[in-house]
Image (cartoon, helix red, strand yellow):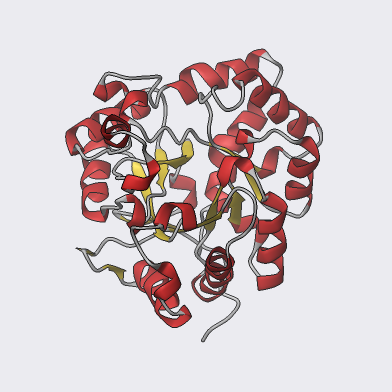
């Protein structure tokens, strides 16, 4: 029997419900990721009460589940995630893994960690729980790549994630910097034996290149349109058009939606916006208005996450 692993325990995939497939509730960026103290503070989400408030608003808008994909170099705090999930009444799936060189640089020396240690860390987080939060287990592996080339340690992480997936069944979700290099990720995952149906190639709405998106879904992978509302990167209207086109091409079953608004200035609970309600109260009606049918919207928000983030059958044991 398959399952989705949340911070409060395993659930039947049918219980997951309406899902934001890529977000952050508690995080803290490395100092190198901001040019000013104010910018660095904007990238820090540390107030549990405010995260509960924001996640509760997501629930009011119809949300039932969220993938929280912070890794150690980005301030993951599994104990706080469990508290936030319990208080807000929303399923939260937490991550193991490491994002990409540009995030762990100066924070964590992934290059100095052996394959065996990285493998053990991910398997432990998934099967036993996080050392800092006994009883809380990871339900997704997070890995990623840089803007122009795949760093050797990034490729190492993608290959190790594929191995851990084969051994544990855990799903994988990725970071692509500005939406770049999705096909390089596809190539590495296929070569490493990952299960495409349980891998999301993320942030593809940061770089709306139709040919690349089509190749991702044609290869059997899920595609993440998970920067919704962030119009400084791509207009939401074009996101709507790309999603509609993929649905018309018969790939509604390969799309997951999210927002990735990991800034105080984006959280209404910190006095910013548009907040977690934008996805369901503004973007989804826009999809409907532009002709995306309800069955396809339900697939993207409910059916696809339930299938993608359910643990796959184990195909290798070490």
Which residue is farthest top? 289
**Res 203 seen here:** no
The image position of residue 270, as x and y in percent, is 25, 24
From the viewer's perspective, is 222 left or right of 250? left
Give the percent coordinates (x, y) of residue 201: 61, 49
Give the residue furthest to the front.
35
Q: Where is residue 50 in the image (x, y as percent from the top left)?
A: 22, 31
Question: Which quadrant holds residue 54?
Answer: top left
Q: Position of residue 170 (x, y in %)?
A: 50, 64
How many marks overall? 0
Within the image, what quadrant is residue 135 found in? bottom left
Residue 268 in which image quadrant: top left
Using residue 225 as the reference point, say whether residue 42 is left or right of it. left
Q: Residue at x 70, y 33 (%)?
A: 208
Looking at the image, residue 130 lies above or below residue 227 = below
- The residue sitting at 40% across, 75% down in the picture is 113
Q: Nearer the viewer, residue 110 or 271?
A: 110
| Residue at x 60%, y 76% (from the top left corner) | 315
Identify which residue is drawn at 59% across, 66% down: 155
Question: Relative to 231, is 258 above or below?
Answer: below
Q: Residue furthest bottom?
A: 318
In the image, is 193 to the left or to the right of 309? right
Relative to 179, is 87 on the left or the right? left
Residue 233 visible: yes
């Amino acid at each position: 029997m398959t399952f989705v692993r949340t911070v409060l325990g395993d659930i039947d995939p049918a219980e997951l419900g309406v899902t934001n497939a890529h977000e952050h509730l508690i995080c803290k960026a490395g100092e190198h990721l901001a040019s000013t103290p104010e910018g660095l503070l904007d990238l820090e989400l540390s107030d549990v009460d405010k995260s509960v408030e924001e996640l509760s608003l997501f629930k009011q808008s119809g949300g039932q589940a969220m993938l929280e994909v912070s890794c150690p170099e980005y301030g993951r705090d599994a104990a706080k995630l469990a508290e936030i999930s319990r208080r807000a009444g929303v399923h939260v799936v937490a991550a193991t893994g490491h994002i990409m060189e540009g995030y762990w640089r100066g924070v964590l020396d992934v290059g100095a960690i052996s394959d065996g240690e990285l493998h053990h860390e991910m398997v432990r987080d998934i099967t036993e729980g996080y050392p800092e939060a006994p009883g809380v287990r990871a339900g997704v592996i997070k890995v990623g790549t840089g803007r122009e080339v795949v760093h050797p340690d990034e490729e190492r992480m993608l290959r190790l994630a594929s191995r851990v997936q084969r051994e544990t069944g855990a799903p994988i979700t990725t970071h692509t910097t500005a939406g770049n290099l999705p096909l390089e990720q596809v190539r590495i995952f296929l070569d490493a034996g990952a299960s495409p149906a349980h891998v999301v190639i993320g942030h593809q709405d940061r770089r709306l290149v139709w040919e690349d998106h089509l190749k991702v879904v044609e290869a059997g992978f899920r595609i993440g349109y998970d920067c919704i509302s962030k119009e400084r990167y791509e207009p939401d209207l074009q996101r709507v058009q790309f999603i509609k086109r993929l649905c018309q091409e018969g790939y509604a079953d390969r799309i997951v939606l999210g927002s990735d608004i990991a800034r105080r200035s984006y959280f209404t609970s910190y006095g910013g916006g548009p907040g977690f309600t934008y996805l369901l109260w503004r973007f989804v009606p826009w999809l409907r208005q532009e002709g995306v049918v309800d069955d396809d919207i339900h697939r993207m928000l409910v059916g696809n996450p339930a299938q993608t983030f359910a643990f796959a059958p184990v195909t290798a044991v070490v």
